[in-house]
């Protein structure tokens, strides 16, 4: 039997980080549909992130992306976040939006461009120092489009060299989270295409290098929960970029495309001890709300993660283990599915009320009039997009 008050305690302590870029306008390469009331500045993105925390109670930090969230005074940005009741989380690097990076950033054949890219990564560690962040998130679009275009092995050497330099620069309480992605924008060979490549680089460097799993960055059909279980077992799971996908890197709301997959992932997280804050697994969202309202989309996503987590915590571990050990295939599967099929919404509503929150975060947010207010306040000036 599962102890409901222990489940509630665990859910109360949950921490889901929202991304600053989710609050800006975004779209596909075909069209960005502008929405009214979208933030114009990094500060306004933080204000919107604070709304998500206000109504869910479990989203106390916001990731920033540099240079999209570049400001003159990062300490002041961190203070702004604190004033709004949140803090700055992971610092995301960006070595993919500069003309110089057409043939790669840290793996570019040109040493001058490699130097420039590394300079940005190190500057982001300076920003971490200023905002008090522990996590540097590294994603590289580096790769090639055509066979023979560049030397695959030399590119790995260049990657290793850059990662070692960043690792060296990290402070005692800092780490980097190394993201991988199967393809896009490189279509032939991405330099960090899968968890194994990220893992191998991280393993060589040491404990401050960890792998981050973006749930949209795999081939269709990949068993992501297996990757999660394996990385956790090796002490190398740094965190998640949660989102959901139907086809490729769709960046849709997590839990929208495949809530069962999210449950399976959260089950492995719980099973592997990754839910314990001491393991340092960061639960971050990496999404874009192209056609739906953004703050509400983030609130819905946070709730989807909470629901999957609640179900994972409800798995009757003793019954599952007994069935597994007895070789009872269908019995074990039934225990697993019972947890997934539990309607956890009443439990979460009750928990929110215990936390002094409204039972229905979406309804409370909609009733607050926040969006109408910012639509009015943010009429003038340039709305931030996915990017600046
Ligand atoms: C790349 O597709 C990625 O997942 C990386 O995390 C980037 O930083 C992010 O998207 C930007 O949305
Ligand atoms: Mn990502
Ligand atoms: Mn992505």
Image (cartoon, rainbow, N blue to C red):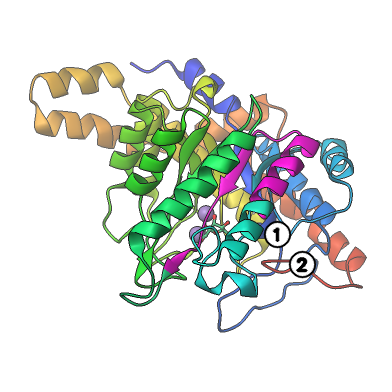
- For marks 1 and 2, give the CA distance: 8 Å
| Figure quadrant of residue 218 | bottom left
Crowd band around label 1 with a 10 angstrom C-alpha radius: few (<14), some (14–19), many (20+): many
Q: Secondary structure at mark 2?
A: loop
Contact (Cβ within 8 Å) of mark 1 with mark 2? yes
The stretch drawn in magenta includes residue 125? yes
Q: Could you say which is closer to the camera, residue 174 or residue 324?
A: 174
Identified at 56% across, 76% down, the residue is 28
Picture quadrant of residue 56: top right
Res. 212 visible in picture: yes
Q: Circle 1 — which element?
A: helix
Let me know if residue 218 is in the magenta part.
no
Mark sitting earlier along the chain (1/2): 1
Where is the C terminus found, in terms of image quarters?
Answer: bottom right
Q: Which residue is mark 1?
A: 23
- Residue 49 in the image: state x and y as whole percent: 73, 48
Ligand 1, seen in the image, is in the quarter at bottom right
Residue that carries the numbered disc 2 in the rendered image: 384
**Horizontal arrangement in the rendering, residue 332 relative to residue 87 (left or right):** left
Which residue lies at the image location 79% right of the left edge and 56% below the top edge? 70
Which quadrant of the figure contains the N terminus? top left
Residue 386 image offset from top left, x and y in percent: 67, 67
Note whether ligand 1 is within 8 Å of mark 2.
no
Q: Is residue 26 above or below residue 192?
A: below
Residue for point 40% across, 35% down: 204
Q: Residue furthest left?
A: 327
Extent of the magenta region: 120-143
Nearest the camera: 177 or 200?
200
Report the front residue among 106 and 145: 106
Q: Is residue 50 left or right of residue 185?
A: right
**Percent coordinates x, y for residue 31 in the rendering:** 60, 82
């Amino acid at each position: 039997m599962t102890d409901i008050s222990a489940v509630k305690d665990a859910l109360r302590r949950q921490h889901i980080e929202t991304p600053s870029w989710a609050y800006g306008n975004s779209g596909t390469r075909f069209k960005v549909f502008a929405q009214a009331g979208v933030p114009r500045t990094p500060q306004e993105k933080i204000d919107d992130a604070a709304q998500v925390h206000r109504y869910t109670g479990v989203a106390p930090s916001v990731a920033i992306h540099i240079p999209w969230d570049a400001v003159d005074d990062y300490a002041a940005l961190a203070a702004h976040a604190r004033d709004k009741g949140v803090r700055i989380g992971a610092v995301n690097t960006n070595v993919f939006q500069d003309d110089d990076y057409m043939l790669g950033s840290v793996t570019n054949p040109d040493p001058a461009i490699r130097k420039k890219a590394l300079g940005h990564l190190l500057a982001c560690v300076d920003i971490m120092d200023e905002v008090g962040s522990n996590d540097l998130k590294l994603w590289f679009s580096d790769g090639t489009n055509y066979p023979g275009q560049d030397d695959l092995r030399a590119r790995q050497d260049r990657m290793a060299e850059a990662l070692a330099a960043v690792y060296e620069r990290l402070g005692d309480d800092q780490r980097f989270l190394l993201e991988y992605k199967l393809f896009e924008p490189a279509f032939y060979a991405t330099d960090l295409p899968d968890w194994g490549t990220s893992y191998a680089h991280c393993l060589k460097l040491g404990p401050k290098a960890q792998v981050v799993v973006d749930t949209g960055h795999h081939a269709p059909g990949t068993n992501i929960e297996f990757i999660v279980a394996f990385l956790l077992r090796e002490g190398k799971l740094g965190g998640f970029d949660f989102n959901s996908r139907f086809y490729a890197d769709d960046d849709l709301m997590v839990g929208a495309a495949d809530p069962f997959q999210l449950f399976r992932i959260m089950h492995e997280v719980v099973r592997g001890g990754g839910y314990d804050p001491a393991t340092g697994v960061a639960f971050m969202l990496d999404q874009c709300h192209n056609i739906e309202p953004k703050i509400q989309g983030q609130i819905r996503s946070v709730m989807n993660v909470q629901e999957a987590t609640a179900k994972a915590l409800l798995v009757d571990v003793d019954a599952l283990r007994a069935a597994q050990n007895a070789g009872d295939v269908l019995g074990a599967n039934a225990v697993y599915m019972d947890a997934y099929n539990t309607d956890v919404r009443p439990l979460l509503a009750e928990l929110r009320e215990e936390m002094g929150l409204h039972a229905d975060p979406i309804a409370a947010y909609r009733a607050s009039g926040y969006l109408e207010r910012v639509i009015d306040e943010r009429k003038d000036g340039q709305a931030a997009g996915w990017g600046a």
